[in-house]
Amino acid sequence: MKDRLTREEVLHVADLARIEITEEELEEYQLKLKDLLDQVEKINEINDHDSNNLIAPWQNNAEYRQDIEEEMLDPKEVLKNVPAKSGNYIEVPVVINE
């Protein structure tokens, strides 16, 4: 297997990335891009299709409670302890700057 990319391959990648590279950078990128592609190939060789991988490293053991509909609170009772109100609504400070 070759240890570097060809000049044309590096120039093509540079063109796709819309960057200009010098001759010195071209030689450096021939080696570095090849090394990067080799690392990606190692990752691709891993066969994980048969394993039972988790999305997260923990299990979700949360217990969910049943959603039970109950009586609504009385608006007058709720509003008697709020600092500012307008009709049956609670007034809150503006948080968006103009």
Image (spheres, rainbow, N blue to C red):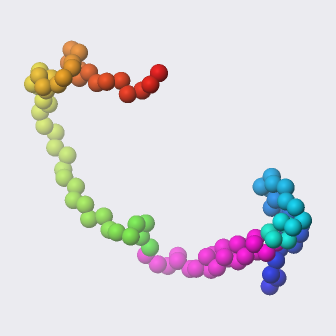
| Residue in the foreground of this view, choosing between 38 and 68 | 38
| Residue in the foreground of this view, choosing between 62 and 1 | 1
Visible residue check, residue 75 = no
Give the prevailing secondary structure in the magenta stretch.
Answer: helix
Visible residue check, residue 69 = yes
| Residue in the foreground of this view, choosing between 24 and 82 | 24
For residue 1, above or below residue 58: below
Q: Quadrant of residue 52?
A: bottom left
Q: Position of residue 49 (x, y in %)?
A: 52, 76
For residue 93, above or below residue 9: above
- Residue at the far front in the pictured view: 24
- Residue at the far top in the pictured view: 87
| Residue in the foreground of this view, choosing between 36 and 65 | 36
Question: Residue at (80%, 85%) from the top-left corner?
Answer: 1
Horizontally, residue 84 falls left or right of residue 77, namely: right
Say if the magenta span includes residue 92. Answer: no
Question: Residue at (26%, 21%) from the top-left corner?
Answer: 91
Q: How many marks?
A: 0
Horizontally, residue 32 falls left or right of residue 23, namely: left
- Residue at the far bottom in the pictured view: 1
Q: Quadrant of residue 76?
A: top left
Say if the magenta span includes residue 34. Answer: yes
Q: Position of residue 23 (x, y in %)?
A: 90, 65
Q: Position of residue 78 (x, y in %)?
A: 13, 26
Question: Residue at (77%, 55%) from the top-left corner?
Answer: 17
Question: Residue at (38%, 28%) from the top-left corner?
Answer: 95
Q: Quadrant of residue 58?
A: bottom left
Q: Position of residue 51 (x, y in %)?
A: 46, 78
Horizontally, residue 48 falls left or right of residue 31, namely: left
Residue stretch rendered in magenta on the structure = 30-52
